[in-house]
Image (spheres, rainbow, N blue to C red):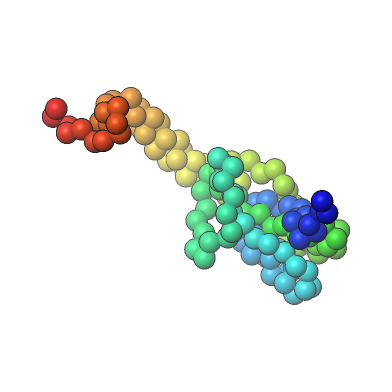
């Protein structure tokens, strides 16, 4: 079995900031370096970059390049005013302390109410009436 070289991509940038992601992709495009953009959630789900991405905790934007172009692409990105990382933290999207506090309160409220909702499904998976 021969290895397919088209599947040999390396992640050279992983960021939570759309501005950094756009700067990097534009620089690579100007240098005619092939690349692939994807979005990754904290759960590990990876998808092609959507048309209208949204920043938030645990959402990352990746740039992958074919292995033969990796060194050249890294050199191009080093010239940009961005943080070169492939392991950003959950809050890497640039949230202020006020935004972080808001997200934490929202999460705690959701977690507090989850156990209060009973399971409305029977063994067959059909929805049961609330007052049953």
Residue 12 is situated, as x and y percent measured from the top left of the image, at 75, 54
> Relative to 106, is 51 on the left or the right?
right
Question: Where in the figure is residue 71, as x and y percent of width and height?
Answer: 86, 58
Q: Is residue 31 above or below residue 68?
A: below
Q: Residue furthest left?
A: 131
Against 15, is 109 above or below? Answer: above
* Numbered-mark total: 0
Residue at 83% x, 54% y is 2
Residue 2 visible in the displayed image = yes
Determine whether, in the image, residue 73 is placed left or right of residue 51. right
The answer to whether residue 29 is left or right of residue 92 is right
The C terminus - image quarter: top left
From the viewer's side, name the closer residue of 116 and 129.
Answer: 129
Quadrant in which residue 102 is drawn:
top left
Question: Which image quadrant is residue 106 in?
Answer: top left
**Image position, residue 111 (x, y; %):** 39, 30
Q: Which residue: 17% across, 33% down? A: 129
| Residue 81 spot, x, y in % from top left | 73, 60
Residue 117 visible? The answer is no
Please give the name of the residue rendered at 24% of the width and 36% of the height, measured from the top-left corner. 127
- Image height check: is 68 above or below 130? below
Look at 63% across and 41% down and name the residue there: 89
Residue nearest the viewer, comparing 78 with 34? 34
Image quarter for residue 67? bottom right
């Amino acid at each position: 079995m021969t290895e397919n070289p088209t599947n040999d991509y390396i992640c050279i940038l992983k960021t939570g900031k759309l501005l950094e992601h756009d700067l990097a992709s534009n620089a690579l495009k100007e240098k005619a370096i092939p690349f692939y953009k994807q979005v990754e959630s904290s759960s590990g789900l990876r998808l092609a970059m959507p048309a209208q991405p949204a920043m938030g905790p645990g959402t990352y934007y990746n740039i992958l390049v074919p292995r033969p172009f990796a060194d050249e692409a890294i050199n191009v990105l080093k010239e940009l005013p961005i943080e070169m990382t492939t392991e950003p933290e959950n809050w890497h999207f640039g949230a202020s302390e006020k935004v972080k506090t808001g997200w934490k309160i929202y999460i705690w409220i959701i977690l507090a109410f989850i156990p209060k909702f009973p399971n409305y499904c029977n063994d067959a998976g059909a929805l049961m009436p609330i007052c049953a």
